[in-house]
Structures are given as C-alpha cells and as structure tokens.
Image (cartoon, rainbow, N blue to C red):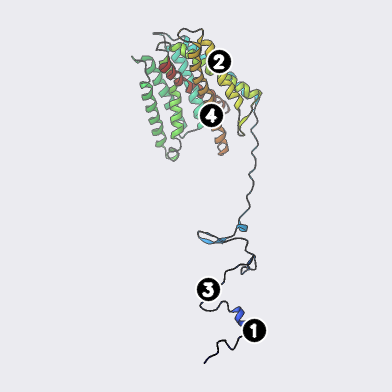
Amino acid sequence: MFPSTSPDTGRDPWPDDAASGPARGYPPAPRTGPADEDAGGRERKGPRRLRKGGPGRRPDDEPEEVPEEEVPPVPVRRPLALTVAGFAALLGVGLVLGAQTAGPGHRLPFAFIIFGVQLLFVLAWTMAMRPPALLVVALVSAGAAAIADAAAVQSEIAGLAPLGYAAAAGFVLGVLGQLVRRVDRVRVTDSLGSTLLIVVGVVAFATLIVLSRIPKGTQAITVCLTATGVALLVARLTDAVAPWPRLAPQVPRGAAGVVAGAMLGTLTSAVLGSYLVGFTPTSAALVGLVTAGTAVLADLAVGYAEAGRLMAGEPPTMWVARHMQGPLGGFALAAPAAYAMCVLFL
C-alpha cells in the first residue's frame, strides 16, 4: 500500500522549482499584478497594438501631436479694393449704355463693345490661370468670341445653339493646341477645367447680344447689368471699409460686402422695374436678385481660386490681370443668368 500523501509534503520547494515555471500539463496562471515588467525592464502601460510590417507599439511610444501654426490673415488693401470697385462700375456702365445702342438692324455697335469686353476677359483669365500653351488658348478663345458674336448678330433665329457650337469648337481647338507640344502635353489633363472655363466664359458675353434681339431683352439687360454693377461696387466698397467677418484668412474679403452687395443690387433692380415698360418691381427684383447674387459669388470664388494658387506655391500673376478677373467673371456669369431669367420668367 502506498501512502495517501507524498513523502515530500511539508518540505520547502527547491529553488529551481520556482524558476522552472508552471508544472507540466497545466496552463500558465493569468497575470493579475498591476504592472508587469518587460524583458527590457520597462513597465507596460497598455496592451500592445499590432501594426502591419513591424512589431507592436505601445501608446506611450506614439509621437506627440504638433499644434498647427495659425496662418496670419492677409491684409485688406483699401486702395486696391476701391480700384476694383471703380473698374466694376465702369464695366457695368459701359455694358448698359452699349445695350441702349442695340436695335433692329443696328446691333454691330453693341457687338463691338461686347467683343472689347471679351478681349479683356481673355487677357485677365489666361494670365491669371496660366494654362499650358497660353498663347494658343488665348488666340483660340478670342476666335471663339468673334465667331459667337457674329453668329449672335447674323443668325435668323435668336438662340443659344450657335454660341454652344462656338464654345465647343473653341474648347476642342484649345485642347488640341496644348497636345501639339510635348512640354504642354504633360499638363493638359490638369488644364482641361481652366481651358473650358476660359472658352465658356468668353462666349457667355455673347448671350447679351442674343438677349437684345428678343422682346423685353434690352430692358432686361438694363435691369440685370445695373443690379450686377451695383452689387460688385457695393461689395468691394464694403471690403475697403469693413471687411468683416472674414470668410477665410487667405482671402481679403468679408461676408458683409457679399451680403450688402446682393441686397443693394436687388433693391436697385426693383427701383428700375417700377419705371421700365414690361417690368414690375417684383419681377425686376427677382431677376436682379439672381444676377446680382450670381455675380458677387463668382467674384468671391475668383478670390478663393487666387488664394489657392498662392498657397500651392505658384508664382503670382500680372497685377492688373489678377484684379480684373473678379468683376469680369461676375459679369460673364450674370449674362447667361439674365438670359435664362428673361426667357423663363418674363
């Protein structure tokens, strides 16, 4: 008979038994201590996290987040804002007075005025956006503008289809001109948007010639372009006096100018609508609200685009072209908006 207890009962374990780990056949006991020591003698403060392609990393090994540096706001230059406001006012007055010279069989003077504004648009936008093959894009855009003006004057039916064909042909020729040179071919994919914007913007002015050929068209041009000019003028004057609140630190524009310009432009169109034949204050205010709001938003978008180019490290463009770009873009977008509002609601 064997005893029920081991003869080693009551003896102290050998020193080697404590270091030999758990007994064979039994799982290791879970760690319940507050902190365990790694092989390097460092306390583990959290579970290991596995990462792909390397060993686990603990939370205390993560790099500290570096606070982002605040970008100082771009200062608002009051003389520059006043100059741009004056240019927008002169542009609006020239287009409105030119529309008054248009009549049945006498639309060439207005077409020449529109063509001069289109050349300014091509100069400002090509120098500001600098697409590949800049000279080719500028010449093609000027040619598309001339074709669109001639089609708007000579077509039997006043419509936008000839202008669409001119814009499509100008865009295709501009892209082909960029594909000819190997240096420009690398950037042609990135410049498709800028080329399309320049060609479509320059052709958009020709919609004013088409609008002058339909009933109430001249009155609509007067209301819409007056509201546009007043909106751009007030927005820039407000930026010169109180550019607050700033919409972005890199853009020297304020929200007060955008809102005040759109509101005063709408008010001006409502006042004109009470004196022009075929308009009421309500209809004129509706048309003026759309065109004035479109113009000030286009002018603001040009400022954001210029700030983005400067932040990307691109060199600044010609001073005159850079600051003519906003008012020209506002009138270019207001022209088809005026045509759409006249056709749909008047």
- Taking the spot 51% from the left edge, 29% from the top edge, the residue there is 127
The secondary structure type at the circle numbered 2 is helix
Q: CA distance from mark 3 to mark 1?
A: 23 Å
The secondary structure type at the circle numbered 1 is loop
- Taking the spot 64% from the left edge, 46% from the top edge, the residue there is 67
The residue wearing badge 3 is 27
Quarter of the C terminus within the rendering: top left
Please name the amino acid that badge 4 sits on. Answer: Val
Q: Which picture quadrant has residue 87?
A: top right
Please name the amino acid that badge 1 sits on. Answer: Asp
Reply above or below: 132 against 262: below
Reply above or below: 191 against 117: below
Of labels 3 and 2, earlier in sequence is 3
Q: In this rendering, which labeled residue sits more in front, label 1 or label 4?
A: 1
Q: CA distance from mark 1 to mark 4?
A: 87 Å
Q: Residue 33, image x and y in percent? A: 63, 67
Observer-nearest residue: 150 or 155? 155
Of labels 1 and 2, earlier in sequence is 1
Please name the amino acid that badge 3 sits on. Answer: Pro
Observer-nearest residue: 333 or 325? 333
The residue wearing badge 1 is 12
> Which disc, if any, is residue 267?
2
Q: Residue 59, image x and y in percent? A: 60, 57
Q: Which picture quadrant has residue 236?
A: top right
Of labels 4 and 3, earlier in sequence is 3
Of labels 3 and 1, earlier in sequence is 1
Q: In this rendering, which labeled residue sits more in front, label 4 or label 2?
A: 2
- Taking the spot 57% from the left edge, 17% from the top edge, the residue there is 264
> Which disc, if any, is residue 84?
none
Q: In this rendering, which labeled residue sits more in front, label 3 or label 2?
A: 3
